[in-house]
Image: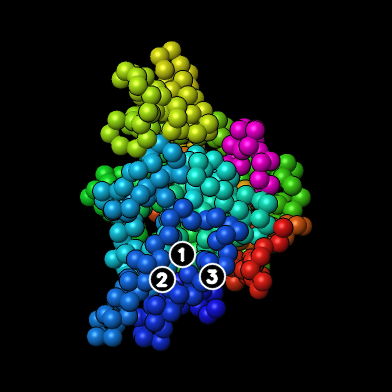
Amino acid sequence: MSDLWRRSASELAAGVQCGDLRAVDVLQSCLERTAAVEPSIGAFLQRFDDAARSAAQDLDRRRAVGESLGALAGVPVAIKDNMNLQGLPTTCASKILEGYESTYTATAVERLVSADAIVVGKTNLDEFSMGSSCENSALQTTSNPWQLDAVPGGSSGGSAAAVASGAVPLALGSDTGGSIRQPAAFCGVVGLKPTYGRVSRYGLVAFASSLDQIGPLARSADDAALGLEIIAGGDPLDATSSDRPVGDYRAQLGGSIEGVRIGIVSELDASSLPEGVAANWHACLDRMTDLGAEVREISLPHLPATIAVYYVLANSEASANLARFDGVRYGHRTDKQVGLTDLYQESREEGFGPEVKRRILLGTFALSSGYYDAYYGRARAVRAALRQQFELGFEEVDVVATPTSPTAAFRKGEKVDDPLAMYLSDIYTAPVNLAGLPAVAVPSGRDSTGLPLSLQIIGRAFDEATVLRVTAALESVTPALGFPMDGAGEADV
């Protein structure tokens, strides 16, 4: 097997652009790596090997006649299967969308293809992005490449596992309360959740429309920055997208962080963290201060309430967004001979999984007459206060650093029967979505069992450049994790 799959997205693109590499060879290397690891991991719901080979051949033909190629020329990429790709199924890992084929392509995906990336497949997720372990998929189970009996995180667990294992150097995920960053943390890759509105949501199947954001998963800050440069920017098809100019994020990655003010949150109680997670967090702070950064404390008084606020708002929006899946227009329809009302009920009963049903019920309750002000209204007020607290905090600091997750990857089945414990996995990531801020999960070490640990770096709105610069600086002084499942092609179990 060629070792081209080990190279970064930026290296592969540069090689294909100048003719040092052939796109077909890059793709073949990644397909061979996928064939070696995918039976153990289960990252992909769909693979497009033949179409990808045709696209790679076309790129090499264009290069041979002197045509200039895009910024992601020949880079194999994977797409979370809640983003539309015209003419292909979009499943959201749910039975209720069986038989559905997309009639259009998501803007973020279209921008990757326009940059000459090669889409090799669509990846597994928690059903409709509702979960923190990828165990809620109705279609298959995905394993953590570092230890196969551990979860890859969720909901973008398939994308994170595909990047970590070496199947692809770059993937897209979506993040509503941590669904890019938490699986990135569990799988030991970089996961970037951009500012709300930085990337178009057109073509993303909505979970919670005021929280969802598409972003890249990669093996380095450089590749994450490259991915963001391609997919970011305004879109007339998404009224919530921003027309602010997209920065040259990669050009700023090598900059010093001397004098950068790193915020730590006084309400974050390190004593409640596992020893390895707390030690890793403090070690990261020490590394950054050694690079000239300054650590300061800030206060976010509403931080302890954010999980409750997030799950009221997210589930309320999910209840409204998922009302469209009714068994009439597309997707699963019950075979039972029933009237119209029962058709809706039976189709949704058969099509949705337990976690999706739970969240629809919780959201519907929060929005119902007599409870709206007590739950949804109060949650919106706390969200507004949290945003103001972040704004005040960023008057004192440039970024905020927290653990990405309160634990390393947990074992399959460990939290399935305890939804509250699963929800608490988002305790450090959900506040970022509520405030609409950018944040990166960056690999920063391992726990005593060898599982990856991660630091989250949060920035001001639309200041992805600083977040990525700090991420790159931390990478430069942190030992690389390397690849799981190396050599013999089997992960440690």
Is label 2 in a helix, a strand or a loop?
loop
> Which residue corresponds to the image point at 25% horizontal and 85% vertical from the top-left?
66
Q: Which residue is mark 1?
A: 170
Q: Which residue is mark 2?
A: 75
Q: Is residue 484 above or below residue 340?
A: below
**Span of residues in magenta:** 409-430
Q: Earlier in the sequence, mark 2 or mark 1?
A: 2
Instruction: Identify the mark at residue 33; answer none if there is no mark.
Output: 3
Asked where in the image residue 147 lies, by quadrant, the reply is bottom right
**Foreground pick, 363 / 49:** 49
448 drawn magenta:
no
**Which amino acid is tagged 2?**
Val
Asked where in the image residue 481 lies, by quadrant, the reply is bottom right
Q: Earlier in the sequence, mark 3 or mark 1?
A: 3
Q: Are marks 2 and 1 in contact (CB under 8 Å)?
A: yes
Task: Judge depth for marks 3 and 2 and give the one in front.
Answer: 3
Q: CA distance from mark 3 to mark 1?
A: 14 Å
Residue 172 in percent (x, y) is at 43, 57
Is residue 264 visible in the rendered structure shown here? no
Q: Is residue 317 above or below residue 15?
A: above
Q: CA distance from mark 3 to mark 2?
A: 14 Å
**Which amino acid is tagged 3?**
Arg
Is residue 375 visible in the rendered structure shown here? yes
Q: Residues within 10 Å of mark 3 (few under 14, many from 20)?
A: many
**Which amino acid is tagged 1?**
Leu
Farthest-out residue, left: 236
Residue 185 in percent (x, y) is at 59, 55
428 drawn magenta:
yes
